[in-house]
Image (cartoon, rainbow, N blue to C red):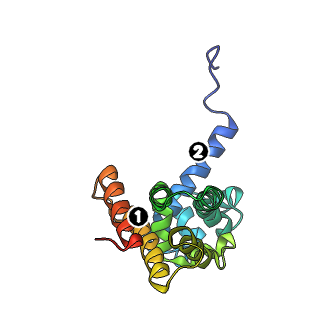
Amino acid sequence: MAHPGHAPTSDRDGRSTDTRERIRQVALRLFIRDGFSHTTLQDIADALGLTRAALYYHHPSKDHLIASLVQPAKDDIDDLLIWAADTDPPPREVLEGFFDRNYRHRLIVLALVRDPTGLGSVDAEGWVTELAVQAQRLLAGDRPTADGRIRAVVAINGLSRCATVLSDIPHDELRTRSVDLALEIVTGSE
């Protein structure tokens, strides 16, 4: 029996939530290692010591599981783009926001870098292209030159990769240096 004033620690919802989170963590690890297309639900169930039926209880399909991992990152980046379109912040703020969101979601972004087929699970056809178009407008203006467009795409892609793969550099240093260099790329200064 739980102590007065304390929530019970073994309620059904808690176990279900814990299992769902364990599934997500193990699946993400396998997706990073083996890719979305080469990781099966059976692989995930085996790694967790669960039956496929138990896995299906929490995620009725592989696409559902992948979407539960990818959609929060996509939504977070979309929120940045909406905010930036509404407020027209300076390029540094856009770049900082983009770095922060990629860093926050770095594990799923890393999985997508290694195997972009995971984007299909969130109905993101054209999303990466639209992201590049939005970045060009935000960082190079409404009528950018070819160089301005290229600089914008190089900057956001570079920031994404820095936030994702350079885990040996301390966060604050990585953020500052990555954003500073991306801003140099965008502005064309050295």
Looking at the image, residue 48 lies above or below residue 184: above
Q: Residue at x 54, y 51 (%)?
A: 22
Q: Is residue 114 visible?
A: no
Looking at the image, residue 123 lies above or below residue 171: below
Q: In the picture, which quadrant includes the N terminus?
A: top right
Looking at the image, residue 137 lies above or below residue 146: above
Give the amino acid at mark 1.
Thr
Residue 70 appears in which quarter of the rendering?
A: bottom right
Q: Residue at x 60, y 74 (%)?
A: 142
Q: Residues within 10 Å of mark 1 (few under 14, many from 20)?
A: many
Q: Residue at x 33, y 59 (%)?
A: 167
Q: Nearer the viewer, mark 1 or mark 2?
A: 1
Label 1, secondary structure: give it: helix
Percent x, y of residue 140: 51, 73
Q: Which residue is mark 2?
A: 18
Most extreme residue toward the top, as rendered?
Answer: 4
Q: Is residue 164 left or right of residue 135?
A: left
Asked whether the residues under the numbered discs 1 and 2 touch, taking CB atoms below 8 Å apart as contact, a structural biologist would say no
Q: Residue at x 69, y 39 (%)?
A: 13
Q: Is residue 52 left or right of residue 187?
A: right
Label 2, secondary structure: give it: helix
Q: Earlier in the sequence, mark 1 or mark 2?
A: 2
Q: Is residue 98 visible?
A: yes
Q: In the picture, which quadrant includes the C terminus?
A: bottom left
Q: Which residue is mark 1?
A: 164
Give the amino acid at mark 2.
Asp
Viewer-proximal residue among 11 and 190: 190
Percent x, y of residue 56: 69, 61
Percent x, y of residue 174: 32, 57
